[in-house]
Amino acid sequence: MPPKRQPILPIPSTTDLIALTLTLQPESDFRAPTHYTTELHSWFLNQVRLTNPELSAYLHDGQSEKAFSLSSITGNLQSQNRSITFSTTEQYQWSIAALTQSVCDWLQNWLRKPPQTIQLRSGIFKIQSWQISLPATTYETIWSAAENPSQTELSLTFTTPTSFRKRSNHMPLPIPENIFQSYLRRWNDFAHLEFELEEFREWINECVVILRHDIRSLKTQAGKQGSVTGFVGAVQFGLTPKAKNEPEYVQLIHSLIACAPYFGTGHKVTFGLGQTQAGWFVDRAIEKDVKPTQVERPIEKKVKPTQSDRPKVKPIQSEVSHRQNELKEFFFSRKKRRGGERAEKAAEVWAAIVARQEAGKTIPEIAAELELAYDTVKQYSKRARKVLEEG
């Protein structure tokens, strides 16, 4: 029997973010490898390719951050010997999140006549129904709401193993810098309001702390090439008193928390890792002896920044030093936020990178000279060139 047709829910044409959850039932019992999420990933991209090849190519390899996230299959899963058994007596759920307007538009069109089955290499699922699991919204709406957030608690619950890439290794810990910079990379790619990653990371390290957590490590198969150790559980973050000196970053933190359920956290979010909920959703029985208000914030020493605390930009050759000074003034004049030292320091680093590039140096050489990460120099160079082109 074909799945019952459902009324098409209107998705506004301006939608940037939305998530859909499908209810699935196997056509017959079958066993799938633990890395079955690679099959779901391929099936989804093929669905896009059938109706919009250009969008499919973009989603596959057209940008640094993927404009969608996919969950793993949830339900009563039976695993044994590196395989999972799906039974016809059970129903399962699978979610798709769209992170840009173009993917939301495709999803809306796809829902007009969705397929009746998901045919994987391992077996076939019948699509019984679907529902909107995360509401349609826009980045602008999220940003505006974060100015005066209704919920001030900064908690996240990680429902599938979450991990980060750190120097070619996995980092299975909820370090604030790693968590929020993973969101900001997606925000900068898809939202219309962009923030400097290095400046934001510095603020995170100074102003965001972990108030409490209930996490554990969990190993999972993230692809054919091997397993990944991640963490699951809940974390509550807090802001130090110093955070209020940068109200725009406070607003950004609340915006990123709101985006986290759509984005997913960390890497391999298109293969089911890093599924995230906004809020604290673990067993509260462990908290009966300790209330959040009893957790002490760290005591900060008020130390006036010294020159040694600031990023050092090594001297450049005399013949291009004048150009670096010109670039610094230009970049600083284009900064929207010129208060404090952050904007000036960012302009100085941008100028140092571009001046060295104009002098014929490569990005690896510049990274070594400035003692910055290669990816940081590459990103700064790209943004600086864009600002130069815009004048």
Image (cartoon, grey):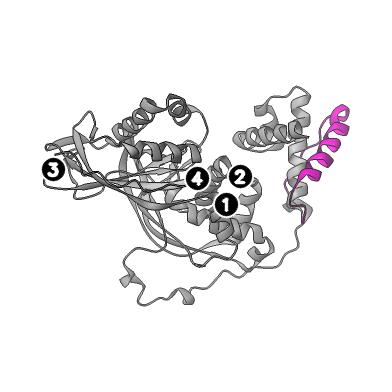
Q: Nearer the viewer, residue 114 or 386?
A: 114
Question: In the image, is residue 152 part of the stretch drawn in magenta?
Answer: no
Task: Give the amino acid at mark 2.
Answer: His
- Disc with the residue nearer the chain's start (1 vs 4): 4
* Residue 192 image label: 2
Task: Give the amino acid at mark 4.
Answer: Asp
Whether pointer 3 and pointer 2 mark residues with C-beta atoms closer than 8 Å, the reply is: no
Q: Position of residue 23 (x, y in %)?
A: 24, 46
- Disc with the residue nearer the chain's start (3 vs 1): 3
- To which quarter of the image does residue 207 belong? bottom right
In this orientation, does residue 32 appear? yes
- To which quarter of the image does residue 105 belong? top left
- Disc with the residue nearer the chain's start (4 vs 2): 4
Whether pointer 4 and pointer 2 mark residues with C-beta atoms closer than 8 Å, the reply is: no
- Look at mark 4 in the image and give the residue it sits on: 16
Q: Which residues are magenta?
A: 311-340
Q: CA distance from mark 1 to mark 4?
A: 9 Å
Whether pointer 1 and pointer 4 mark residues with C-beta atoms closer than 8 Å, the reply is: no
